[in-house]
Amino acid sequence: MELKEQIIARKRAQIQAEQAQRPLHELAAAALGAEERRNLRTALGGPQLRLIAEVRRPTGADLAGLLFDPRIIAQEFAGAGAATINVCADDPELGSELHLVKRARRYMALPVICWDFFIDEYQIYQAWEQQADAVTLPVELLSDDELQHLIRVAQKLYVAPIVVVRDGLELESALSARAGVICIENRMLESDTDALERTEKLAGDVPPDVLLISAHGITTREDAQRVAAAGADAAVFEPPVDYDLARDAIRDLRGIDAPGRTTRPACPRRSTDISESPFLDD
């Protein structure tokens, strides 16, 4: 079984077990009258590359003597100059730790992205309940119809849908779905290796009115300058586990000009029946 098939099977089993405890209709009822969340597009706008600092549960040697508290980590990242916090909620062994999103969001005012393998609307309702401001929709794991449906669900809950792509075909699907925020994932799903060439290759095909994020593989100022020059408006990076080093890393990546919308070609948007989201235009 391919890795993506394993991920889908794992997520389906997880969703089925959680729905047995709390059906979708209960989550949907709780979400009636959902109010707008922290605005991702506003946080990631501007003439300079915006930094999305990633909160990820440490593993292996990183666990030694480390207190993992997303509340403290998010505060530290925000204070150092991050524009948005990205919480990796998926753990192959523990399942989706969506509660980390709510904890990260508690003591600072930045939008929080819930980074997980979202393949079902049930997960989006769960993320909304944990106060996520945005969710990631991986085109690699979704059909075009599923992608469009999940975008609608997220928009209904005022949660920004971030459509994640890895190649040109997936980018076509994202544009056909009128995604307002697209993330180019530089990390290979199978090998967990990074290649900034993905952003450099695909960014030119993203319309200037689409917010473009480049994710992972960005560790140095030179890396950040590369994705900014390619047309990225924002970048997801993993700060070091040590708080002091993390603050220094964030500060080192600040102040990089991001031509973004002004240099990407004005590609025509695809027509679709999906209504515009409040996250597409401020």
Image: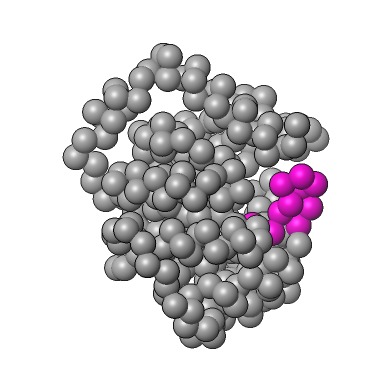
Q: Nearer the viewer, residue 28 or 43?
A: 28
Question: In the rendered view, would you say 79 is above or below 199?
Answer: above
* Residue 27 percent coordinates (x, y): 32, 27
Magenta region, residue range: 185-194
Quadrant of the frame with the C terminus: bottom left
Q: Residue furthest left?
A: 33
Q: Residue furthest top?
A: 21
Q: Could one spot residue 208 in this view of the protein? A: no
Question: In the rendered view, would you say 50 is above or below 264?
Answer: above
Question: In the rendered view, would you say 200 is above or below 187?
Answer: below
| 176 is within the stretch colored magenta | no
* Residue 172 percent coordinates (x, y): 55, 64
| 192 is within the stretch colored magenta | yes
Judged by its main secondary structure, the magenta piece is: loop
* Residue 122 percent coordinates (x, y): 41, 31
Q: Is residue 171 left or right of residue 186?
A: left
Q: Could one spot residue 212 in this view of the protein? A: yes
User: Residue visible at 47% across and 31% down?
Assistant: 99
Q: Is residue 111 left or right of residue 251?
A: left
Q: Is residue 151 left or right of residue 136?
A: left
The colour style of the image is one colour
User: Residue visible at 27% across and 50% down?
Assistant: 36
Quadrant of the frame with the N terminus: top right
User: Residue visible at 29% across and 24% down?
Assistant: 25
User: Residue visible at 42% across and 50% down?
Assistant: 148
Residue 219: quarter of image: bottom right
Q: Nearer the viewer, residue 35 or 83?
A: 35
